[in-house]
Amino acid sequence: MASAFFSLIDSIGEAVEGVVENVESVVEHVEHEVDSMAQHLDAAVDLDDVLEDINSAGCSEAALLDAYRRLEGLAKQQTADVLRGWVIEDKVMPVVCAALCRVESARLAAGALARTLNGMGQALNDTGATAEEQRAFCEQLVRRTENGKAMLKLMQAQDAASQTEGLALLRRVYPSTKKVLGSHLLSDPASVTSLMQILQDAGGSSWAMPDQEADRRAAALCAECVRFLRLVTAEDGDVRMIVTFQDGPEALLAIASQALSAVSAAAATRGGIPES
């Protein structure tokens, strides 16, 4: 009888432990959900304020720069899930794109916007978004920038790091929107001219020996520009022809020469002989 009694106690104990574990699990889940909800609410309040500032910037690039930077700072504080929510809720894209379309130039403000939008696109990747969701993000961005026309301003940013972000964003959206971008953005001679200017500047720079931060940024810009051109020229015969007539091959040869010089210098530093 004693044996049966203690067996019953053990069974009850095990049952109680199981209940406790279940309760703790539920509590942890609820706490996580509450924290997540609070974070979303805080982010939503801050986001509404920033979006209002972007709307109020009007045609002033200085005001837009400040508002875009605030948005970038806010985005950096959010989890990938929150940023994905920004995409799905479609609150951010209409406002930031309308502001980009309004200003005559975004040479100073383009970088902050491109970094934020690239972060939102990356959040879709990191949270396992479907191909349809990612395609919708690309299509929304192009549609809300006058079918991509306003994205020219991203390529005309003042500094190399911002231009790199702009080209990375274009490369992200191009596969899903190639026909629209080809008809409205890349058909504009100013777009290809901007790309060729980046290439020509890169061919004459010292980026191949990136000892300084500026050189590293120039190298990153050059690489992004070449990636984007490879992507576009493989699909668009008109752009391929324009690049050919705007000294594109010469610029690419200059870049190749820079790269070979860097390889040779690195090999000499190691005391080796570069392979031919």
Image: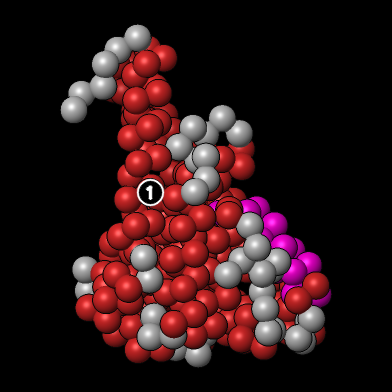
Residue at 61%, 34% (x, y): give it.
Answer: 212
Residue shown at the point (49%, 64%) measured from the top left: 197
- Quadrant in the picture for the C terminus: top left
* Front position in the image: 268 or 147: 268
Query: Please, what is the three-letter code of the amino acid marked with disc 1?
Result: Ala
The answer to whether residue 211 shows anywhere in this view is yes
Q: Residue 94, position in %: x, y?
A: 57, 84
**Residue in the foreground of this view, choosing between 62 and 217:** 217
Q: Quadrant of residue 260?
A: top left
- Residue holding disc 1: 254
Q: Quadrant of the N terminus?
A: top left
Q: Is residue 231 magenta?
A: no
Colouring: secondary structure
Q: Secondary structure at mark 1?
A: helix
Q: Residues within 10 Å of mark 1 (few under 14, many from 20)?
A: some
Is residue 43 shown left or right of residue 87? Answer: right
| 121 lies above or below 260 | below
Locate residue 22, reporting x and y percent.
Answer: 44, 44
Specify the segment rendered in magenta.
63-79
Which residue of the protein is positioned furthest toward the left in this rendering? 276
Q: Is residue 64 magenta?
A: yes
Q: In terms of image quadrants, where is residue 15?
A: top left
Q: State whether residue 43 appears in this view.
A: no
Instruction: Say whether residue 33 is left or right of residue 5.
Output: right
- By secondary structure, the bulk of the magenta-drawn segment is best described as helix
Quick one: 212 or 261, which is closer to the camera?
Answer: 261
Quarter holding residue 64: bottom right
Q: Whole-percent x and y of residue 254?
A: 38, 49
Along the line of sight, which residue is nearer the eye, 130 or 161? 161
- Total numbered labels: 1
Q: Is residue 137 left or right of residue 43?
A: left
The residue at the point 52 percent across, 77 percent down is 152
